[in-house]
Image (cartoon, grey):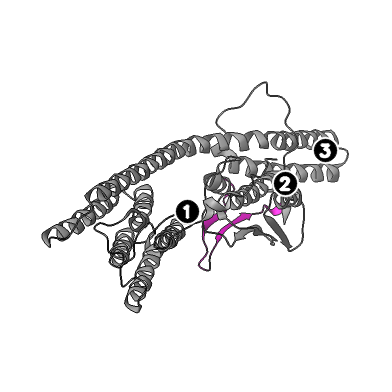
Amino acid sequence: MSTVPPPQPLVKRVPPGAWTALVWCASTLFTLLTTFRLPGETEPGRWPAAQLYRWDGLTVLVVATALAVRGSQLLHRRPLAALTLIVLAAIAETTTLGVGELPMAQYLTVVVALYFIAAAHPRRVAFTALAMAIATLIVYLAVRLLRGWSVGMSAELAVVLVTVIAWLLGNSAHQARVHAERLGAEHAARAVTAERLRIAREMHDTVAHSIGIIALQAGAASRVATARPQAALAAMRAVENEGRETLAGLRRMLVALRAADEGESPRAAPAGLGDVDRLAATTSAAGVRVEVRRLGERRQLPPDIDLSAFRIVQESVTNVVRHAGTRQCHVTLRYGDDELALEITDEGRGRGSATDTGFGLAGMRERVALLHGEFTAAPRPEGGFRVAARLPLPAAAR
């Protein structure tokens, strides 16, 4: 059984909008600190404008903060609108400082937001955001020059340089992500074939066992057909039942049977739903508590269904640990009269992805399709992610 990776660090789980709002608060605090004479200084780093600590200056500061926070909230869904609000917040706060340019501290939130936009959104949106950020600086200086006011050209050129560098870093992150997604898609295509072959190998022992039983029952029936016809009839009925079950199993696995691995060393006994408790204990030890609930009457399942059900639970729980950003998930196993239902839910960020331990959602969907079942995986309306599968049971397992 694969090991469960530890949860992601808190730093990686904080969304870009939260980082943007945090940068605004830090830069605002820094600006206010520079207006005081700090230890070791003969005078403040910046002399405040007259209105900075008056009611009108404080009102502008509150309005600017509200604009920045709202822009941070919209950063993921509406990036250009969010950037507009953050730019307006930077301009508004600068009006209370009495300076000749948009200072680095006030424009730092714009720079951070620009990085996240370039990293997470299409190229067209990223270029538009960069143009907005640079045009704001140019227009701000142009207005001051036309009015004959002083301009901090050197400081503003430094802000432009940092803005362009942040955009380039975000664009590089975007290109790396696109490349990784393309490689992931290619890997998923290869993984489907590999998964089918792996399932076929896991079914080898089961099919061989069933064929052996059929041969033994048929031989017994032929030996007692004349002397004990009732015993021969019972043996042939056993042959019929075993043959039907074997044929059903072969039909379910036919897509995966592409080639046989010869000379392979004996494999360990396949896993099954009996290992779910051990999986839950391992995952809980890694930091994500797994609650397992079983409904209905537990009973012996065909090996292919038992193994596939366990793999679905295993991959789903691993996805929760890797991507959900939560400390708890719920696994429900429902034994029905004619089907086995699985449900794995969490209350995390509503993300599902492929994992290193198997083939993620693609592998689970493939397994369920080979068993003629139903599979769904999607974010929950109330938050979190849900994976559900229904696996029909053969007549002998009902």
Label 3 Cα crowd, 10 Å radius (few <14 / some 14-19 / many 20+) = some
Q: Residue 342's spot in the image, x, y percent? A: 64, 57
User: In x, y percent, where is residue 43?
Assistant: 39, 58
Q: Earlier in the sequence, mark 3 or mark 2?
A: 3
Quadrant assignment for the N terminus: top right
**Amino acid identity at mark 2:** Gly
Q: Quadrant of residue 224?
A: top right
Q: Earlier in the sequence, mark 1 or mark 2?
A: 1
Q: Is residue 380 magenta?
A: yes
Q: Which residues are magenta?
A: 369-396
**Position of residue 180 measured from the top left corner of the image (x, y, whole percent):** 44, 39
Q: Percent x, y for residue 311?
A: 64, 46
Vertical side of 162 occupied by 109: above or below: below
To which residue does mark 2 refer?
A: 272
Depth check: give the residue in front, 277 or 105.
105
Residue wearing tag 3: 225
In three-dimensional space, the C-alpha distance between marks 1 and 3, rounded to whole angstroms, equals: 108 Å
Give the residue pinned by disc 1: 40
> Quick one: SS at disc 3?
loop
